[in-house]
Amino acid sequence: MRLAFPAACAVAACICAVLLTVRMFLGPFGGPVPIHSPLNLEGIFALLVLLTAALRSRKTPIELRGYWPGWVSLAVIAILILGAFGRNLSFPLLADDYPHIWNARHITWNSALAHFTQPEPDRFFRPLVYWAYGLEAPFAGLNPAIWRSISLMWHVAASLLVYGVLRAIHAERLGAFAGAALFAVHGARPEAVFWVAARFDLMAATFGLLALWLLLKWRTNWSLAALIPALLCKESAFVFPLLALLFVMVENRSWTNAAKRLWGWFAAAAVVFAWRLHVLGEIGGYHNTADGRPTIFNLRLSTTLKGFFVRAWAALMVPLNWTDSPDIAISLLGFGALLTLVWFAWRGGNRKLILTGLAVFLIAALPVHQFLSIGDDLEKSRVLYLPSLGFAMVLAGLTRGPLAVNLLGIFLAFHLAALDHNLAIWQRTGILARQTCQQAESPQGYATVPDMPNVVDGVYFLKTGYPHCAWLDGKTTPAPQTLHWDDKTRRLR
């Protein structure tokens, strides 16, 4: 009976893998002949894999020797990132990229200081990233490749730090490489890495991961120096003291030791949060358009649980934008990757690392719980950037033994293929956005288009960025008027 339930979960997960592969061959969601969304099936598969892994995990196995040294892993991770993203750097900017770059090009010393002392119009408190934009603007100009290259460097740093954190919590070398490589080339990365407006997530995660790594290396004072910049990049960074507490307790299980090492972390977070409240006059963050209340208070039990345990893990394990049909290669690699996950889960792994990874996901996802119900087109997948550290830890705990090297190759190949598939959609939408902006070049150009779509194929479009897109090239435009967006022709009318 001890094997019956996990075996049933593994068999059911294999059936889901077959059905998902068939679904990949059938094509995208919607269209002339609508096909049902795969999200529920993806979510069921993810839950079955996690259940199997949790039930089959055991105490920490002895580390296998003979794998490449750590510097080789770091080099391979960096090469994977540059190879996966490098050829897609130059497609046009999108949506909020334009307002951020517009403001950065007009930043002054007084306006830079005001980011620390005055509320932003959108009720965010993220001063350090606005400073970074301002420092980059003079040499980046309007070149999307330079802006994205800077974002890519932050992502490289974050991915290497994931490897460092995994090794610091005693993951095997192969497992640490597997987790960090997954974090590096995960299929859902386009929004977090290539949308310039998502730099907040990249910088907050990178500084926070640096702080965790330093803490785990017993560099407590230096870790505190890295934590404060993370808190000044995005509100999601306030989970890092909780993540640090989790790691310290798993490592030592002593509240006294945790208090000695982390009192400075919680004190710093409290001070920054108090200043944030003072500046904003409220908790800040995203707000509902209907009533103006912060969205973090949107606690609906069924929706929140569905996001935490179904939709988020569906996007993590099958990161495909379904607005385009996956090709045959992606479908076959997807089948291999899904079966690899089932096999890893059935063999079990490092119980402490797997369960800690699940806890990391839950803690890191708390500030973005209201956005976890990610749809077929992966819109808002950037909110999974830090929570995906938990998935990386689960994979690190499951990856062990010589056979895992070959299976890991299949798994990473699927994510690389899914990443390329999703990046192609971002590139296409970026070109469409630029073509739309170019309509403002004539004397009949328009400064605002109220009914411009916010999202096209899961990619943020020009609802908030069209005026700045038209102005950034030095164009003069007439008084705001209204054009209508035609979904069929994808042009303004």
Image: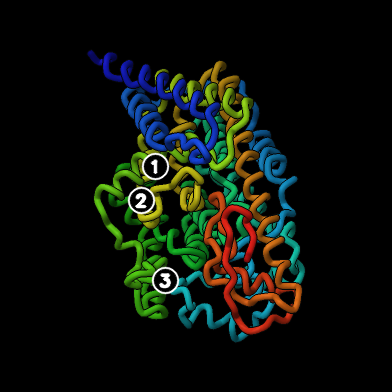
Q: Position of residue 75 (x, y in %)?
A: 69, 38
Mark 3 or mark 1: name the one nearer the start of the chain: 3
User: Based on the displayed image, in which of its 4 quarters is residue 9 positioned?
Assistant: top left
- Given the current orientation, which residue lies at the most extreme bottom position? 110
Q: Position of residue 109 (x, y in %)?
A: 63, 84
Q: Would you say 493 lies left or right of 252 here?
A: right
Residue at point 34%, 51% (across, down): 258
Reading the image, the residue beneath label 3 is 272
Vertically, is 94 above or below 280?
above
Vertically, is 94 above or below 134?
above
Q: Nearer the viewer, mark 2 or mark 1?
A: 1
Vertically, is 67 above or below 487?
above
Q: Would you say 352 lies left or right of 324 here?
A: left
**Badge 3 vs badge 1, beta-carbon distance below 8 Å:** no
Residue at point 55%, 42% (across, down): 323
The C terminus: image quadrant: bottom right
Q: Give the alpha-carbon distance from disc 3 to disc 2, as whole Å.
A: 18 Å
Q: Residues within 10 Å of mark 1 (few under 14, many from 20)?
A: many
Q: Amino acid at mark 2?
A: Leu
Q: How is the image coloured?
A: rainbow
Reading the image, the residue beneath label 1 is 311
Reading the image, the residue beneath label 2 is 245
As helix, strand or loop, the secondary structure at mark 1 comes to helix
The N terminus: image quadrant: top left
As helix, strand or loop, the secondary structure at mark 3 comes to helix
As helix, strand or loop, the secondary structure at mark 2 comes to helix
Q: Nearer the viewer, mark 3 or mark 2?
A: 3
